[in-house]
Amino acid sequence: MKLAELIKERRSIQLYEDRPVDLEQLKGMLDTAVWVPNHKMTEPWRFVIVHGESLKKVAELNRKFSATGSSDEDRKRSGEKAYQKIKDVPVLLMVIMDENPDAKLREEDYAATSCLIQNFSLLAWEQGIGMIWKTGALTTQANFRELIGVKRGEKVVGMVQIGYPAKVPKARNRTDVQKRIEELN
Ligand SMILES: Cc1cc2nc3c(=O)[nH]c(=O)nc-3n(C[C@H](O)[C@H](O)[C@H](O)COP(=O)(O)O)c2cc1C
């Protein structure tokens, strides 16, 4: 696929086939994905691949965290929905970044790590693998951080859900960028 097509056709995927993803293939894609621009070459990232029983534990945490509502029944329903949303995801990739104490460097590190995630999702899409980048409130919770092994001074930039797409959603429209381009001469 041409790069322009790949960029436009990639979609965030919520529903996955019940089909395992080769973890070595994912690790190999990260070898390429790290070739991002990175001011001062800080390489602030590390990764935790979560699957199997550990993934079920993340789903359980999501159940507890999301069980909100005014009645027991409401809490049970919202918790169960949150649990189901994660338990059928084949693999989670936690993208973890060192939070530089310097605000400018921290922002630049976040930018570089974001480029890495986009590289990774394009590489995956090229190979028929889908994903969605999640930044839900769960990823900042103490019990979640403990389960994943996120240390003080680290940020979870993304909980990337990965798998072969069972459903590819329709693209959401993008505003015509030409209207947002100015030229100064
Ligand atoms: C930094 C970032 C955080 C995101 N967090 C979430 C999220 O928490 N939940 C979610 O459903 N989608 C999340 N998304 C995915 C967007 O919703 C998605 O990219 C957008 O709807 C456009 O769809 P597309 O990626 O298929 O083009 C996130 C995307 C980015 C870049």
Image (cartoon, grey):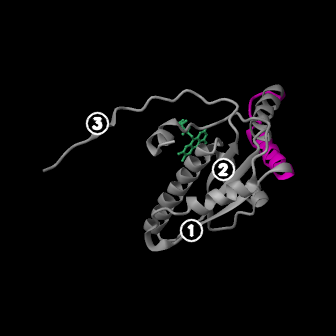
The residue shown at (79%, 40%) is: 19
- Is 181 colored magenta in this rendering? no
Residue type at tag 3: Gln
Task: Answer with mark 1 or mark 3, whichever residue precedes in sequence.
Answer: 1
**Residue segment shown in magenta:** 53-72
Decide which of 32, 95 is in the foreground and name it. Answer: 32
Crowding at mark 2 (Cα within 10 Å: few <14, some 14-19, many 20+): many
Judging by the rendered image, the residue that carries numbered circle 3 is 178
- Compared with 25, 20 (above or below) is above
The residue shown at (27%, 34%) is: 179
Crowding at mark 1 (Cα within 10 Å: few <14, some 14-19, many 20+): some
Judging by the rendered image, the residue that carries numbered circle 1 is 44
- Residue extending farthest to the front is 1
Calculate the distance from the C-alpha at mark 2 to the C-alpha at mark 1: 16 Å
Q: Nearer the viewer, mark 2 or mark 3?
A: 3
Q: Magenta residues: mostly which secondary structure?
A: helix
Crowding at mark 3 (Cα within 10 Å: few <14, some 14-19, many 20+): few
Tell me residue 177's x, y (percent). Answer: 33, 37
Task: Answer with mark 2 or mark 1, whichever residue precedes in sequence.
Answer: 1
Task: Answer with mark 2 or mark 3, whichever residue precedes in sequence.
Answer: 2
Tell me residue 184's x, y (percent). Answer: 16, 49
All told, the count of numbered labels is: 3
Q: Is mark 2 within 8 Å of ligand 1?
A: yes
Task: Classify the position of ligand 1 by quadrant: top left, top right, bottom left or bottom right.
Answer: top right
Judging by the rendered image, the residue that carries numbered circle 2 is 159
